[in-house]
Amino acid sequence: MKLGIESIHMHIPTYALDLRDLAAERGVEFAKYQRGIGQEVMAVPAPDEDVITMGANAALGALEGVDRDAIRTVVFATESGIDQSKAGAIYVHQLLGLHSNCRTVEMKQACCSSTSALHFALSTVALHPKQKVLIVAADVARYGLGTAGEPTQGAGAVAMVVSATPRIMQVEPDAGYYTEDVMDFWRPNYRDEALVDGKYSIKVYLHALEECWKNYQQETGASFEQFDHFCYHLPFSRMGLKAHLHLAREENASLSSRELQQQIEPSLGYNRLTGNTYTASLYLGVLSLLDDDSLELENNRIGFFSYGSGCMGAFFGGTVLPGYREALKTDSRRRLLAERQFLTMDEYEAFYQFALPKDGSEFVTPRHQTGAFRLSGMKDHQRSYEKVPVAAGNAGGSTCAYAAAPFMG
């Protein structure tokens, strides 16, 4: 029985900041961003956009052509959760209008929770092959204005349908794992911005990669040469290249520097144009690879490394299926990127500083371009969401004509 990804899609904010403008404002050379960390554009969420709206927008695309009645589980992976108790999956489930006989859950372990969700989904489908699982990974990366992490900020979501009838990729059941209690990156409940020890986090990331690969080899007997391409968790795009070269050295790979770069480069494109998307970043890289028209990936074996600070890592493999392009929505993702509105520095900082009332009082959010769903406001400590009519400016590329239908989350 084949298990894997039947459908996959992404959503990113309609607004973005050109890092040339950020570099000029912060008094640094743009090359520090472009070449130093590999970033060019930062995705910026609007005030009426959060992980729920982005996740629902991504899921809307992932569910096109999929039997919704077969969705029996929705897993929401994030480290930007909006509630300490209620799962984000419930909000997404409601916005999408999925049937009530459905299990909904939220997972957290930094950026690695989306991979835990994937492995959870594979186990679920293995036990119940007629069922499908919807995974939603959505995050907003915040480090603070003027901080070293500012140019790596970003936002976005990736949604996947996992089933026993995969059309895009068969995911292998075996994986190598590694966990260690470290403080390289964390965000206490009382803070909106993450705390990070950048140099230490890179060191821990690479150590976790080594340990996950060793464990994966023990479990499977796999070798580096058995993979055609690799995708890594991308806090910034240069980290993916750094990690790949590190693993190649550890394995004494016989490939040239150019060949090694060709194995990783196609997966970096979307990250350069969005910034860090935490739980979604690995799978945004997968989409960047799959959407590359210059590659024919049928039957190619892909190696994946997922890393979540704190820390946990996972290495696993998958094989791209014949006819995968027919199941992709590449053109819609290109439209998302091409049609974004670029903010001025003043607009970017105003978006950044926006916050819902801390006392839970009634508030109506200003309307911006958010795709098919938006955060409409707050009342009695409850966030409210609404479906956006196409006439109101559906920037997500969806063709669904919704009537506005707010509900209290």
Image (spheres, helix red, strand yellow):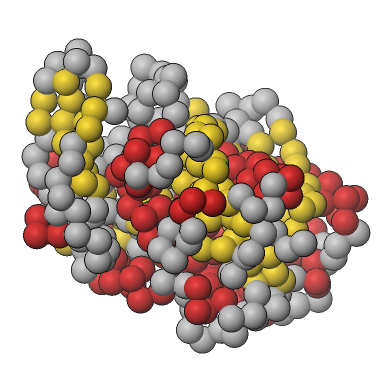
Residue at position x 83%, y 47% in the image: 215
Q: Is residue 29 left or right of residue 78?
A: left
Q: Residue furthest top?
A: 359
Q: Is residue 182 left or right of residue 96?
A: right
- Using the image, determine if residue 219 lies above or below residue 325: above
Q: Quadrant of the N terminus?
A: bottom right
Residue 365 visible in the current orientation: yes
Question: Residue 131 at what x, y percent from top left?
Answer: 61, 50
Residue at position x 58%, y 27% in the image: 183
Question: Residue 51 at what x, y percent from top left?
Answer: 35, 40
Q: How many marks?
A: 0
Question: Residue 27 at what x, y percent from top left?
Answer: 23, 51
Residue at position x 57%, y 63% in the image: 6
Residue 314 visible in the current orientation: no
Q: Is residue 343 left or right of residue 189?
A: left
Question: Residue 35 at what x, y percent from top left?
Answer: 43, 65
